[in-house]
Amino acid sequence: MQNKNDNIYILIILGIAGTFLLVVSFILYSIRNQNKLLKQRQKFQQAEIAHQKELLRAVIESQEAERKRIGQDLHDDVGTMLSGLRLIIEMFKPKDENDVHHVEFIKSSKNTIDKIVKDVRNISHNLSPTTLAYYGLVAAITEHCTIINQSGKLDIAILNNADNELGNLDSHTATAIYRVLEELLNNTIKHSGASNANIKFFSDEQYLKIIYTDNGRGLSQQVTSKKGMGMQNIESRLLNINADFKLGNYNDKGFSITINYPVV
């Protein structure tokens, strides 16, 4: 009788152990399947992000190509025609050189054409800065800031402590950073009421860092939570080159943004 009870206990223990092993096996199988599904989902998300980046890159490159074409057309066609028109007016001689009205008309026409030629040149430069292609990012942004400084709209200072990193940027990355800085400067001029802006380039072991600041009104929390077209453009261009950014705290005394571009 005792042996029979012992056998029953053994069978019960074996049954419990078998059930436990079955449950553990089922749990491990479920976890394995979940991990496999999670990895597949992550791969799909990464592929989707990569695809979106490629689409974004294609759109940006298409925009830059169109900017370049329009800029060249303005410079080559419109600029040339205006210069020709100025020469024609300069060659025009009134019958009576003492005729004040004719003299003033010629002078006024030449001044107007000179202003239009300058505006066309500036527009052409903004659309397709040739300095960027031939001399690099620092030269291009310096030239752009010089034009703004001369206009009296804003006083911009540039500090460059990252010559090597900036010199090694490929054209796609240099163009993206140039457009971001251009957008920041436009926002400062149009919306901030600032009188000064600063652009600083420096680097550490991992990142090329760009700090942009101005002494304008800054962005309130309400504005930063609702991204305008300018900030969306900035975010898109930085995303496309795998860079990130951080806005400075709002203190009603200015605007600041730090851009980190990985160089390793």
Image: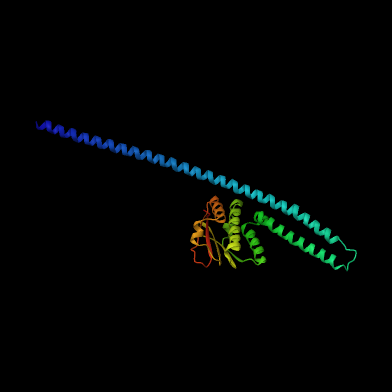
Residue 140: name its quadrant: bottom right
Count of marks, rendered view: 0
The percent coordinates of residue 2 (x first, y second) are 9, 32
Considering every residue shown, the one lying at the far front of the view is 101
Q: Is residue 14 above or below residue 244?
A: above
Residue located 18% across and 32% down the image: 11
Task: Please tell me which residue is depicted at 75% across the width and 52% down the height of the picture.
Answer: 77
Farthest-out residue, left: 1
- In the rendered image, is residue 167 in sight? no
**In this rendering, is residue 227 above or below 104?**
above
* Residue 211 % position (x, y): 54, 62
Q: Position of residue 222 (x, y in %)?
A: 49, 60
Residue at the spot x=81%, y=65% of the render? 107
Depth check, front residue: 227 or 77: 227
| Horizontal relation, residue 145 to residue 24: left or right | right
Q: What residue sits 79% from the left and 62% below the top? A: 109
Q: Is residue 26 left or right of residue 14?
A: right
What's the coloring here? Answer: rainbow
Residue 77 visible to the viewer? yes
Q: Within the image, what quadrant is residue 144 found in?
A: bottom right
Q: Is residue 16 left or right of residue 230?
A: left
- The N terminus - image quarter: top left
Q: Nearer the viewer, residue 30 or 250?
A: 250
Left or right of 89? Residue 212 is left
Front residue of 49/15: it is 49
Residue 99, how many percent across, how many down? 87, 67
